[in-house]
């Protein structure tokens, strides 16, 4: 997630600054990335090899992963109702402080309903600005909190603002966490216009894509039903991030990012 400020929207100038920063980060941090296609190719190709937990082979189906950052929040239960009704799995990159610790029952529900639970740090500090011990603390605190609630530690993480480097990769590998970036974003931190959020996602949608949304902003959850409806109409199959990589496995420390069409 980027441009994060709990309960507030960023101004236009700030949003542009964040977007520029993100472009520089994704374009020049020097960390190699693996695409979902690369992950699948490296795993082999027998008849059942590509099928994920739901029996979907993303080498053949037009798969897309719906992901939510920085929750859970007050609207997450409503989002879970939508996902359950539509039978759509999602991956939730959870923020520890004031989210996991504030909504433990929602974290448990996310896991119990078959969604993928992942790590988005404890307090959304920019990991590349921290020393190794601080990076480890940001990730470890959320690992511990999620495990206490769900019984399992996450195996995926998303660095705030997508910023990563060799130091972050080293700590992530140590903690058993693969790094997951994205290829589709609605910039929903900068607007409460659900129609605009919907259109931004649909304009960028592509096979093997990873959608970045936030279940903490007012305009986002209302946009989700129509996003799902239209992407299903276009022939997309929704999967979790891990299912998108199957039969490949998300390797700790490695950075995964789809290529945009």
Image: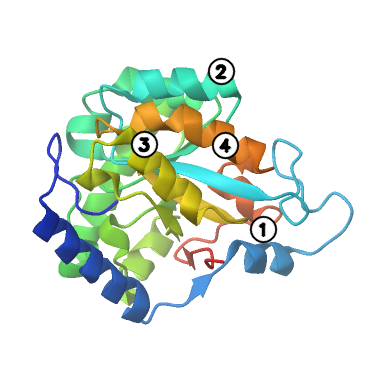
Name the residue rendered at 67%, 58% in the picture.
248
Q: Are marks 4 and 2 in contact (CB under 8 Å)?
A: no
What residue would you read off at disc 1?
Answer: 248
Label 1 element class: loop
User: How many dots with numbers?
Assistant: 4
Q: Label for residue 70?
A: none
Name the residue rendered at 50%, 63% in the picture.
256
Distance from the alpha carbon under mark 2 to that under mark 1:
29 Å
> Which is more N-terminal, label 1 or label 4?
4
Q: Label for residue 230?
A: 4
Name above or below for residue 232 compared with residue 119: above
> Which is more N-terminal, label 3 or label 4?
3
> Which is more N-terminal, label 2 or label 4?
2
What residue would you read off at disc 2?
Answer: 85
What residue would you read off at disc 3?
Answer: 195
Q: Mark 1: few, some, or many residues within 10 Å (few <14, many ≥20)?
A: many
Residue 3 position within the rendered picture, expressed as x and y whole percent measured from the top left: 19, 53
């Amino acid at each position: 997630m980027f441009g994060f400020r709990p309960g507030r929207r960023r101004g236009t100038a700030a949003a542009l600054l964040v977007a520029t920063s993100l472009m520089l980060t994704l374009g020049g941090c020097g960390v190699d990335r693996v695409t979902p296609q690369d992950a699948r190719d490296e795993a082999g190709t027998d008849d059942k090899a590509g099928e994920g937990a739901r029996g979907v082979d993303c080498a053949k189906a037009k798969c897309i992963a719906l992901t939510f950052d920085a929750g859970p929040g007050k609207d997450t239960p409503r989002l879970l109702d939508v996902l359950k009704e539509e039978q759509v799995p999602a991956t939730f990159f959870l923020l520890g402080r004031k989210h996991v610790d504030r909504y433990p029952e929602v974290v448990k529900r996310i896991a119990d309903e078959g969604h993928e639970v992942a790590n988005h740090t404890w307090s959304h500090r920019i990991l590349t600005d921290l020393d190794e011990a601080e990076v480890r603390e940001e990730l470890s605190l959320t690992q511990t909190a999620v495990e206490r609630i769900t019984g399992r530690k996450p195996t995926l993480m998303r660095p705030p603002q997508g910023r990563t480097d060799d130091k972050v990769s080293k700590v992530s590998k140590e903690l058993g966490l693969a790094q997951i970036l994205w290829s589709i974003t609605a910039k929903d931190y900068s607007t409460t216009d659900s129609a605009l959020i919907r259109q931004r996602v649909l304009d960028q949608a592509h096979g093997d894509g990873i959608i970045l949304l936030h279940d903490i902003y007012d305009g986002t959850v209302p946009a989700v039903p129509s996003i799902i409806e239209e992407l299903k109409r276009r022939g997309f199959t929704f999967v979790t991030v891990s299912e998108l990589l199957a039969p490949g496995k998300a390797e700790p420390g490695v950075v995964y990012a789809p290529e945009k069409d």
